[in-house]
């Protein structure tokens, strides 16, 4: 064994397959190495893959050959003793399918193998101990998710040091299909929680292959419902569910319901996402701010005025504890179904002249635009964190929006009476609202996302 001077990580021809040169310290007594060192290795580019199980394969004689198996988890392969010839084949869908990498490994070298990449090895020495960390618990049912390719596939043309006819193989490994007959391992799916709501419907329209669940199947306000749900097939979970009855949240019953769905339920989602290595996308609100600032950046400290805003802020803080997360903060959401724009359109059509608040300011955010932003961030692999998303263009008041709707419906501007918040609240029991809800969009724009102007989206919506 040749000692290595320093830890290093090298990419290979297979996307995500990494070769790790380990720092092995040897003396007259033997040798020592840090086989897995989370901080050092992740700093060098190895994914923080969260191993939960350590397996060891002891092989009595040289020539023991195993694989090629692609498994539904990531693994970190290394040796405690002996040497192997390793072979890895990309069995994921895409242009890399069928790419093969081979390498000889001793205790001084490890390999990070991403989900869906087939793994095989042949021992070159007697009494070889092959060790691997995985980030999911093995089960008999999990084996049904494996994808295999034959060790002797002619197109791969792997140069096994010990010819396969002289090697020790299992009958199952001999019977695996050739590459031409292999069905690529399907990527982990996307789950939309709250599929029955305005945003949930927009997300499923954008992602027809995603799985959507309504409250009947996954109720965030019910811990037992979340605990019973199987998150293991999903790589991305989008939380489009929330308690959004802003005024009702100020009541005793509403306060408890808001905290149950927006905080306790989100905490359970975070726990599930961490356990199953999911990216969690969580939709938040301008109500986490008091509206004092005329425009809100992502790093503005929380300052919610009411119960709804308090629960959303608490949920945001919980989601931020998860490394793989996106919080999308929105304002004045408009989608299919009942909302401010549809209400104003109905009033205009019925000849009703409303009084509309003229001293609260923001931008409409259409659900299709939120869905587009979520898809953009996931597709480009944007840095995790919080992003503001709303429509682009000029900041408007609610009265400005109402006037635009009435005008589009052929009603005179005079039909909309502009009132102050104080005038509108008189005699009503209403939750406090932020005066300024406009969100700074510079961060998401820097990723290449261009928010559609509110005026254009509103015109399309009214059509």
Image: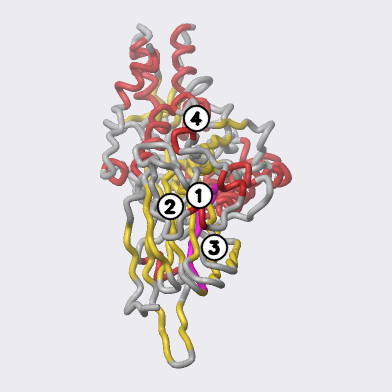
Give whichever of 214, 96 is nearer the camera: 96
Asked if residue 73 is among those painted magenta in the image, a careful observer would answer yes
Any part of residue 430 in sight:
no
Element carrying mark 1: strand
* Residue numbers of the magenta segment: 69-80
Q: Are marks 1 and 3 in contact (CB under 8 Å)?
A: no
Mark 1 or mark 3, earlier in chain: 1
Q: Which residue is mark 4?
A: 199
Element carrying mark 4: helix
Mark 2 or mark 3, earlier in chain: 2
Q: CA distance from mark 1 to mark 4?
A: 42 Å
Residue found at the very far bottom of the displayed protein: 28
Q: Dot 4 surroundings within 10 Å: few (below 14), some, or many (20 or more)?
A: many
Q: CA distance from mark 4 to mark 2?
A: 41 Å
Mark 4 or mark 3, earlier in chain: 3
Q: Provide residue 193's location: percent of width, then percent of height.
A: 57, 36
Give whichever of 56, 287 is nearer the camera: 56
Mark 2 or mark 1, earlier in chain: 1
2 left or right of 188?
left
Q: CA distance from mark 1 to mark 3?
A: 17 Å
Q: Which residue is painted at 55% across and 70% down in the image?
A: 129
Q: Provide residue 19's location: percent of width, then percent of height.
A: 37, 62
Q: Dot 1 surroundings within 10 Å: few (below 14), some, or many (20 or more)?
A: many
> Which quarter of the figure has residue 51?
bottom right
Rendered view: 165 above or below 199 = below
Q: Quadrant of the N terminus?
A: bottom left
Element carrying mark 3: strand
Please give the count of numbered marks on the rendered protein.
4
Q: Which residue is mark 3?
A: 133
Q: Which of the two marks, 4 or 3, is nearer to us in this view?
A: 3
Circle on res. 88: 2
Q: Provide residue 6's location: percent of width, then percent of height.
A: 33, 76
């Amino acid at each position: 064994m040749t000692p290595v001077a320093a830890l290093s990580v090298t990419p290979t021809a297979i996307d995500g397959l990494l070769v790790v040169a380990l720092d092995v310290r040897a003396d007259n007594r033997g040798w020592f190495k840090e086989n897995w060192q989370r901080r050092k290795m992740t700093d060098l580019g190895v994914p923080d893959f969260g191993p939960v199980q350590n397996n060891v394969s002891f092989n009595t004689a040289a020539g023991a050959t195993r694989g090629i198996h692609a498994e539904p988890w990531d693994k970190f392969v290394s040796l405690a003793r002996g040497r192997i010839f390793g072979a890895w084949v990309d069995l994921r869908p895409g242009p890399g399918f069928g790419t093969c990498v081979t390498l000889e490994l001793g205790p001084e070298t490890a390999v990070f193998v991403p989900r869906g990449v087939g793994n095989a090895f042949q021992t070159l020495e007697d009494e070889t101990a092959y060790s691997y960390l995985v980030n999911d618990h093995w089960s008999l049912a999990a084996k049904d998710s494996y994808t295999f390719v034959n060790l002797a596939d002619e197109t791969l043309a792997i140069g096994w040091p010990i010819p396969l006819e002289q090697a020790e193989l299992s009958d199952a490994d001999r019977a695996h299909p050739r590459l031409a007959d292999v069905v690529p391992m399907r990527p982990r799916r996307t789950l939309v929680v709250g599929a029955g709501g305005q945003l949930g419907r927009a997300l499923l329209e954008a992602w027809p292959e995603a799985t959507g669940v309504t409250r009947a199947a996954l109720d965030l306000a019910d811990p037992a419902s979340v605990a019973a749900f199987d998150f293991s097939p999903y790589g991305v979970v989008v939380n489009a569910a929330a308690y959004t009855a802003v005024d009702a949240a100020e009541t005793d019953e509403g306060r408890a319901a808001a905290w149950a769905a927006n905080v306790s339920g989100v905490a359970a989602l975070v726990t599930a996402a961490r356990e199953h290595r999911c990216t969690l996308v969580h939709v938040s609100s301008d109500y986490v701010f008091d509206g004092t600032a005329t425009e809100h950046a992502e790093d503005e400290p929380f300052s919610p005025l009411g119960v709804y805003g308090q629960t959303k802020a608490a949920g945001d803080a919980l989601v931020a504890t998860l490394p793989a997360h996106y919080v999308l903060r929105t304002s004045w959401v408009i989608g299919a179904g009942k909302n401010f724009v549809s209400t104003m359109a109905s009033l205009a059509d019925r000849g009703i002249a409303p009084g509309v608040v003229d001293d609260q300011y923001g931008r409409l955010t259409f659900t299709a635009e939120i869905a587009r932003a979520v898809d953009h961030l996931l597709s480009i692999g944007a840095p995790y964190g919080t992003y503001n998303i709303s429509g682009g263009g000029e900041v408007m008041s609610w009265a400005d929006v109402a006037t635009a709707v009435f005008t589009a419906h052929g009603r005179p501007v005079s039909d909309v009476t502009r009132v102050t918040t104080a005038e509108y609240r008189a005699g009503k029991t209403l939750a406090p609202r932020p005066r300024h809800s406009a969100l700074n969009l510079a961060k998401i724009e820097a990723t290449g996302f261009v928010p559609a102007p509110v005026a254009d989206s509103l015109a399309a919506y009214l059509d």
